[in-house]
Amino acid sequence: MSLTAPRAEAVPGDRGTPPPRTPARRRQALGLDHGAWFLLLPALLPILVLSVGPLLYGVALAFTDEQAGRTESADFIGLLNFTDLRHDSLFWESFRVGLVWACSVTALQFALALGLALLLNQNLRFRWLARTLALVPWAMPEVVVGIMWRLVYHQDAGILNRTLSQLGLIGENVDWLTNLSLALPAVVLVGVWAGMPQTTVVLLAGLQNVPHELREAAEVDGAGVWRRFTTVTWPALRPVVLAITALNFIWNFNSFGLVYVLTQGGPGSETRLPMLFAYEEAFKYGQFGYAAAMGLAMIAVVAVLLTVFLRNRLKEEER
Amino acid sequence: MSAAPTPAKAPRARRARRAAGRAGQYVALACYLVFLAFPLVWLLSTSFKSPQELASIVPTWIPREPSLENYRLAFEAHPLARSALNSLLVAGSAALISVAVAVPAAYVMVRHRSPVSRAGTAWILISQMFPLVLIIIPLFLILRNLQLINSLPGLVLVYVVWNLPFSLWMLQGYVRAVPPTLEEAAAVDGAGRLRTLTGVVLPLLAPGLVATLMFSFVTAWNEFFFALVLLKSPERQTMSVILTHFVGAEGVADLGPLAAASFLATLPSLLFFALLQRRLVNGMLAGAVKG
């Protein structure tokens, strides 16, 4: 964040004398006058009322037994939802699936996106095509991405089985999305495909920050491709890598639409991410309080990561 | 040019290694192109195939007799046109409202650094991180009390709030690029803050405004989770929700219309991205670097 923007309130002359305590002065404790508030509120109010408010309400709901069909108000039940959650093996299963999914998608996304970003940073022919194509998943609704990959994975009419059997790699057609051991990897691949654009763009931005002179100097000194990458490119890229990886992990852990369309969480609960489980609990079985507790438990995971992420980010900014 | 040794001076072994490296890069790029493109090609190809061709045992890459039959069937099977209109209305109004509200706020947040601005920026980050289920349950209850469940205005409201953080973020970047000296000149001429904003900043912001508008539109157009939870009757549902009805009806016969409807649902976003690609990437790059 740039710190160069001038403070509108700063008056250069009177730095030495403490300002008199007038009402106007006190209002400026928040650094804003009437006019500024007037411009800010149309955005702040909806955010407060429909975003911060519901979030707090949601946290409160986690300690109640709110259900869909209830007419009377919900009762406060303390930590009961959380003790239930602790013994809910299906929840832990979804949690495990969520972690496996988020880790593998994030890692593969990063590896593939880094490769693509490095290639796009080179002066190659057809890189405009790759650049355009790399952005396409971003423009597509996640539902369409899910449907599209269902068509690719389709047992009889899908292109994947056809290609694999033509290459002689499989004897008979595989039903990727209902196979117990293949469903999760198949879904992970879709997650990687869908999430590559952001990662690639951010890494490309990071690469453009790598000083050219340094790389050229390293080349003159006879450093090979790998040495140049580890000593020049990677250190410059590190802050960006950290940010995008933390964010990707959180997004992936909280994702819903893709897997909902691809497998609905099946077969069994092989691909049932925490969000799918919480969605079913809330809107299929009407257990609002319980589902809210699940949301909180998911935040706990995210919060740990957020702390690490923000602490590192603040360190970067202090430099 | 660089100070690196020119190919002519380099020993033959190094030149060979260079060439091999180049070739390797092209092979890698080709792999990426295939990985990125083949699902799309398949979607398009499937959407143009006749039912007989779809039912054949060995699927073909390119339709032998391309037809628009699937597109016709798609509109017959489900209220697709209606849902497209719904999506258009919801995404359009959500984008307009959120950007209209975000512009003055972004301006204040950039020009008047204060705890409020900082809290706003922090919220932008934080709001990306919590699981939507924690916010949709209370929203569902609130909107139900306001009789706004299963209504498009209710969804617009949700999307406006959902778009706001990102719109604020994008617009802050564009506002920062406006030189403050111009505003100071306007202030010297006696223009108030609102006049400065509308007369000086807004015209300079126009390209950024368009980009933010389009991005908000696409986000809302593509959104699925809120729409799935909040909209119940098919004639009110948006396109992404209607598409899942195609999936629900299992069977090979439906693959064609499913592909056709899916491609149609992607068209507006693809068009916008095609128009906006460069600006969007640059905006994202700027955001990612300056954060």
Image: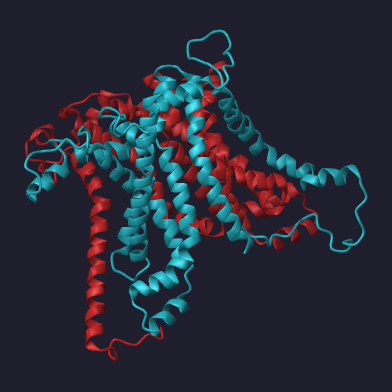
| Quadrant of the frame with the C terminus of chain B | bottom right
In the image, residue B252 sits, relative to residue A25, either above or below, namely above
Q: Is residue B132 left or right of residue B32?
A: right
Residue at image coords 23%, 77%: B19
Residue at image coords 47%, 24%: A291
The quadrant holding residue A73 is top right
Badge count: 0
**The one of A251 and B192 positioned closer to us in this rendering:** A251
**Residue B152 in sight from this viewpoint:** no
Chain B on-screen colour: red
Residue B27 locus on image (x, y percent): 22, 65
Q: Residue furthest bottom?
A: B9
In the image, residue A309 sits, relative to residue A61, either above or below, namely below
Residue B259 locus on image (x, y percent): 24, 36
In the image, residue B14 sits, relative to residue A137, either above or below, namely below
Q: Residue furthest top?
A: A71
Residue at image coords 37%, 36%: A96
Image chain in cyan = A
Q: Is residue A222 left or right of residue A318?
A: left
| Quadrant of the frame with the N terminus of chain B | bottom left
Residue A300 locus on image (x, y percent): 51, 37
Residue B267 locus on image (x, y percent): 34, 42
In the image, residue A56 sits, relative to residue A190, either above or below, namely above
- Colouring rule applied to residues: by chain
Residue at image coords 77%, 49%: B192
**Residue A49 in sight from this viewpoint:** yes
**The one of A42 and A55 positioned closer to us in this rendering:** A55
